[in-house]
Image (cartoon, grey):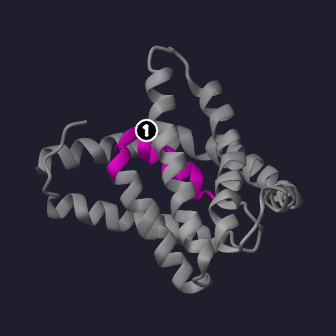
Amino acid sequence: MNRPNVFSAHHLTILGLMIAVTQTSRLFFSFIPNVQPVTVILILLTITFGTVDALIVGIGSVFLSNITLGMGPWTFAQIISFSVIILFTKIFSLCISKVKKPVFFWILFTGMAGILFGIVISVVQAPIYGMTVPALLGYWLAGVWFDVYHAIGNVVFFLLLYPTLVPLLNKVNQQIKKSQ
């Protein structure tokens, strides 16, 4: 989607609200390790709003929620991980754009995004903590169950959010285009 470089007040308001929704959903589910709808919301935003808007919401929601949950080296790793997932989402959406009923492929993708998130987090944090490659592998393998929880959570949230959130986001995106 080609948009001007300047965001309208309406567009900025929607992005601010999406940051708040994403951050709130992360806090609401923070008692379950690695099971929050953030990844799915960012995937759906990438599909409907585009890469730039999803990156803005992803970065904003990580900063905002980590103000409450705690800042640390993981904040940088989370931003990188969500950014990688957003970029992969854009690439994946282009690859399956000709598929008539892509929901099954999106379900698989959202599950794999949970695993990808954990891998990227581990790789980004490895130099911060001075890990060697064997230590990185052990670190990731020790937390692989959390990545599996993330993957399962993503699939469940996708199944719950996709049918209602995509039409809503498409409608809001049309309103944003009209306001510019």
In x, y percent, where is residue 166?
A: 45, 40
Q: Is residue 63 left or right of residue 78?
A: left
Q: Is residue 94 left or right of residue 156?
A: left
Does 166 appear above or below 132? above
Does 16 appear above or below 46? below
The residue at 51%/70% (across/down) is 62
* Residue 165 visible, this angle: no
In x, y percent, where is residue 12?
A: 24, 63
Tell me the kind of residue under disc 1: Ile
The residue at 77%/67% (across/down) is 33
- From the image, tell me which residue sits under label 1: 47
Dominant secondary structure of the residues highlighted in magenta in the image: helix
Q: Which residues are magenta?
A: 37-52
Quadrant location of residue 123? bottom right
The residue at 13%/47% (across/down) is 4
Q: How many marks?
A: 1
Q: Secondary structure at mark 1?
A: helix
The residue at 62%/82% (across/down) is 69
Quadrant location of residue 134? bottom right
Does 47 appear above or below 71? above
Does 37 appear above or below 155? below
Q: Which corner quadrant holds the N terminus?
A: top left
Foreground of the two, 104 or 89: 89
For label 1, the crowd category at 10 Å Cα-Cα, with few meaning under 14, some 14 to 19 and many 20 or more, is many
In x, y percent, where is residue 47?
A: 43, 38
* Residue 3 visible, this angle: yes
Q: Is residue 145 left or right of residue 46?
A: right
Foreground of the two, 170 or 84: 84
Magenta stretch encompasses residue 137: no
Quadrant location of residue 8? bottom left
Foreground of the two, 58 or 103: 58
